[in-house]
Amino acid sequence: MPGFPRLKDAYDIVIVGGGHAGLQAALKAALLNHSVGLLDRGPKYSRSFYAPKMDNLPGFPQGISGHKLLDLQIEALRPWEEKVSYFTPARASSARKVDSGFEVNFEWLKQPRTIRAKALVLAMGVVDRMPQVDGKIDPIFPWANFAIVDFCILCDGHELQGKSVAVLGDDAFAARTALDLVHFAPTSIEMLTRGGEFLADVTAPERGELERQLTKARITRFDADIAGFDGIREKRFHVKFVDGSIRKYDRGFSALGWYERNKAIPESLGAAFDEEGYVRTDADSRVLAAETAQPIPGLYVIGDQASGWKQIPEAWATAERAIIHAYAYLL
């Protein structure tokens, strides 16, 4: 497992997404004696897949890689193959409400399929925006895979104490991220705008206030566009610029926000979204309707796709709440 399960006529619960939230939801549903159809694009689509070490997870005092944690969660499903039909690589394309619950269209083994369930759990996650060089994101991967470039303050901020840090980004989010990193006592912070117009997304008064705060915090800025990276052998973040200069840092920090929030399916089902584009849910991870602000019966969103903190323990918590509520809903 994953393997080649037989597609049943219907399930109690369909889960779209096989990251940490989706896998936990599938396990919990099986433990509560529900049949589950799990649609997983594959582990490489999980945000943590390339994380070499995560220190903020209970039960792993030495830390654990995202890849290893996904493997362990998949392994935990193996005893429950009678309950969990695990389809991978499977990509959901659409979903709709039907009288019996929900119907999801997906592609599996290069064939279009349809899966039905009484309850639907969306755990599709979000996608980080990656730094580009000549329109390509591949150049940053080695530095990200070796944790030389970080993406999450709450996950990796503690690693930056005593280090020089380059923050990639030119908007207010990037500026606030650089200011937040001061808390972790790096030796220096420099913003790399990659040639973009600095703070173009805010009003003049807000721009002035952010620039004042950056100056007070001794956060510098370099505006040339990036031509490439170096320093991997020294496990450092060296940045080459189009003007021919090279600047050297201990670590990089990407503050470019999100590339994709996977809004299409929840939007088609009538979900409400917060101001940042995440799905609004109640305390039981039930999706709130855009028209009424009331829960949509049988529809749940968990993990990074939901409004809230983007942390694995939080993803697990939203999965637990959704499935426990679904258990009661299906009864």
Image (spheres, helix red, strand yellow):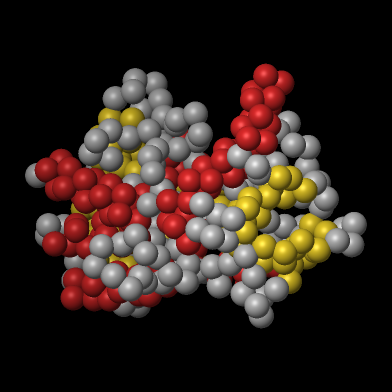
User: On the image, which quarter does residue 101 sit in?
Assistant: top left
User: On the image, which quarter does residue 331 sit in?
Assistant: top left
Residue furthest to the right in view is: 243
The residue located at (37%, 72%) in the rendering is 64
Residue 280 position in % (x across, y down)? 38, 33
Residue 251 position in % (x across, y down)? 60, 62
Q: Is residue 51 above or below residue 326?
A: below
Q: Is residue 264 above or below residue 206?
A: below
Question: Does residue 104 appear in the picture of this structure?
Answer: no
Q: Quadrant of the N terminus?
A: bottom left
The residue located at (65%, 42%) in the rendering is 218
Q: Is residue 146 above or below residue 39?
A: below
The residue located at (63%, 53%) in the rendering is 188
User: On the image, which quarter does residue 202 sit in?
Assistant: top right
Position of residue 257 in the picture relative to residue 18 (left or right): right
Residue 244 position in % (x across, y down)? 89, 62
Between 137 and 232, the one lying in front of the other is 232
Between 238 and 74, the one lying in front of the other is 238
Question: Does residue 274 appear in the picture of this structure?
Answer: yes
Position of residue 152 in the picture relative to residue 285 (left or right): right
How many discs mark residues in the rendered view?
A: 0
Between 7 and 250, the one lying in front of the other is 250
